[in-house]
Amino acid sequence: MSKVRKSILFSLGQNYASFALQFAVSIILARLLNPSEIGLYSIAAVLIGFASSMRDFGISSYIIQERNLTPDKIRAAFTLTLFTAWTLALVILLGSTYAANFYHQPGIRSVMQILALNFVLIPFGTVPMAYMYKKMEFQYIALIKFLTNLTGAIATVTLAYLGYSYLSMAWGSVA
């Protein structure tokens, strides 16, 4: 089987397995959490979503498309990713109190602060993942993505079961 076909199969397999996993987690969370807890997390996640669209800043595309990728260019890409993501984490931390006050829900502040941790951690995976895409290492990418989703799912369900309420979804996202 050609490398392209294998890559497509790995990618499709990962996508469908992750979809099934997320579907199962949604069903379980619907039993463990009440609608207001899910809604509180959802509000914070939507607010974080705006920042998520800017966190990569096009660095992944640059690494994938750059023909002459040198160690200096990789370091520069990592530095820019780190600066952008950590700046967004700081903005989220500072804005979390305002968002909580606006919605009159103190829990939004906690969720946003936990989700800001993702922005601190993301730069350490962005450049290596982009490099794996460049090298067309799709079987490893699929495995990493699935294991990431599985880890988050297990953490979320376990914490929800243990009574962490809406924070279980935030910590699951960080996991």
Image: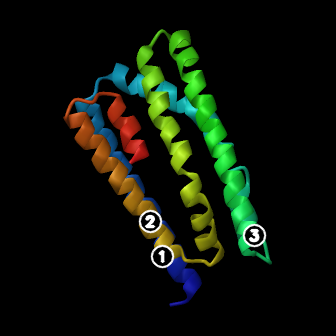
Cα distance in 3D space between marks 2 and 3:
26 Å
Cα distance in 3D space between marks 1 and 3:
27 Å
Q: Amino acid at mark 3?
A: Asp
Q: Amino acid at mark 1?
A: Gln
Q: On the image, numbered disc 2 is attached to which residue?
A: 144
Instruction: Identify the image quadrant of residue 54.
Output: top right
Q: Position of residue 42 (x, y in %)?
A: 46, 28
Viewer-closest of 25 and 165: 165
Q: Does the CB distance between marks 1 and 2 fall below 8 Å?
A: no
Q: On the image, numbered disc 1 is attached to which residue?
A: 139
Q: On the image, numbered disc 3 is attached to which residue?
A: 72
Q: Amino acid at mark 2?
A: Ile
Vertical order, 4 against 31 (above or below): below
Tell me: 172 left or right of 93: left
Vertical order, 2 against 167 (above or below): below
Does dot 1 land on a helix, a strand or a loop?
Answer: helix
Dot 2 or dot 3: first in sequence order is 3
Residue under the point 37% across and 39% down: 171
Between tags 2 and 3, which lies in front? Answer: 3
Q: Position of residue 101 (x, y in %)?
A: 53, 10
Residue 9 visible somewhere in the drawing: no
Viewer-closest of 2 and 124: 124
Viewer-closest of 28 and 81: 81
Does dot 2 land on a helix, a strand or a loop?
Answer: helix
Render colour scheme: rainbow
Q: Position of residue 135 (x, y in %)?
A: 62, 78
Residue under the point 56% across and 11% down: 102
Does dot 3 land on a helix, a strand or a loop?
Answer: helix
Residue 65 visible somewhere in the drawing: yes
